[in-house]
Image: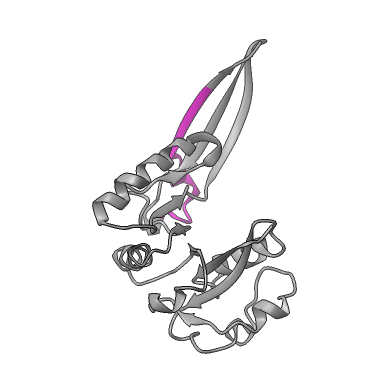
Amino acid sequence: MEKIGVGILGATGMVGQKYIHLLENHPWFEVTYVAASPRSAGKKFAEAVEGRWLVGTNLSNKIANFIVEDAANVEKAKGKCTFVFSAVELASKKDIQDLENAYAAAGIPVVSNASAHRWTENVPMLIPEINANHLEVIEAQKKTHGWNKGFVAVKCVCDSTSLYEMTDRNCFRLSLFYCEEMRNDDVLNTAAAGDHMLKVSINIHFG
């Protein structure tokens, strides 16, 4: 099976490094493009992360020798990857939205780890096991923007967990707990997390 070439935006940061680690030897995907800030652009990836490779495994020679491109230069990604995982960190959420939209406009789908688009009306925030049907909104998103192949989808917030509980012998309840986005000054305040906690429950019947 021929693997799908993917790019990583923000590849030199902690989340970008984690993407590279998780995609190593993946059965479906192969990292074929890495991009980051102008500070890292033009360097070999190994040089760009020297002294700050954080995921605890050896960096493969293939990735180490990739030349890091400037994530702001969308044209560089064309023909080098089928879609991108976005882990960019920019000055504002608007900057991230604009950059991710630019990739989508160029025909490159974006699956984003960033929070910038989590409140955008026609961008699905996915937990595939629960709301895969939300992918249907992508067609409306593409129509609104006049995009052909490109689109933006985001993952859920990081702070989530699930609980299974039997309600009777023929039913169990799946409850998903997750934190809404918190203000910057709340991030390290664990007491504040309760104020942002949401719960979604699904009853699953069998028998």
Q: Identify which residue is drawn at 53% across, 41% down.
A: 128
Q: How is the image coloured?
A: one colour
Q: Identify which residue is drawn at 65% across, 72% down.
A: 54
Instruction: Give residue 45's quadrant in the image.
Output: bottom right
136 and 118: which one is in front? 136
Instruction: Give residue 12's quadrant in the image.
Output: bottom right
Residue 141 horizontal side relative to residue 178, left or right:
left
- Vertical placement of residue 186 versus 14, above or below: above
- Vertical placement of residue 110 versus 14, above or below: above
Residue 142 appears in view = yes
The answer to whether residue 198 is magenta is yes
Q: How many marks?
A: 0
Name the quarter where the C terminus is drawn. top right
- Vertical placement of residue 110 versus 32, above or below: above
Q: x%, y% of residue 169?
A: 67, 10
153 and 115: which one is in front? 153
Q: Identify which residue is drawn at 48% across, 73% down.
A: 79
183 and 74: which one is in front? 74
Magenta-drawn segment: 186-202
Q: x%, y% of residue 11?
A: 54, 72
Name the quarter where the N terminus is drawn. bottom right
Q: Identify which residue is drawn at 39% across, 55% down.
A: 152
Q: x%, y% of residue 30?
A: 63, 65
117 and 149: which one is in front? 149
The answer to whether residue 194 is magenta is yes
Instruction: Give residue 140's quadrant in the image.
Output: top left
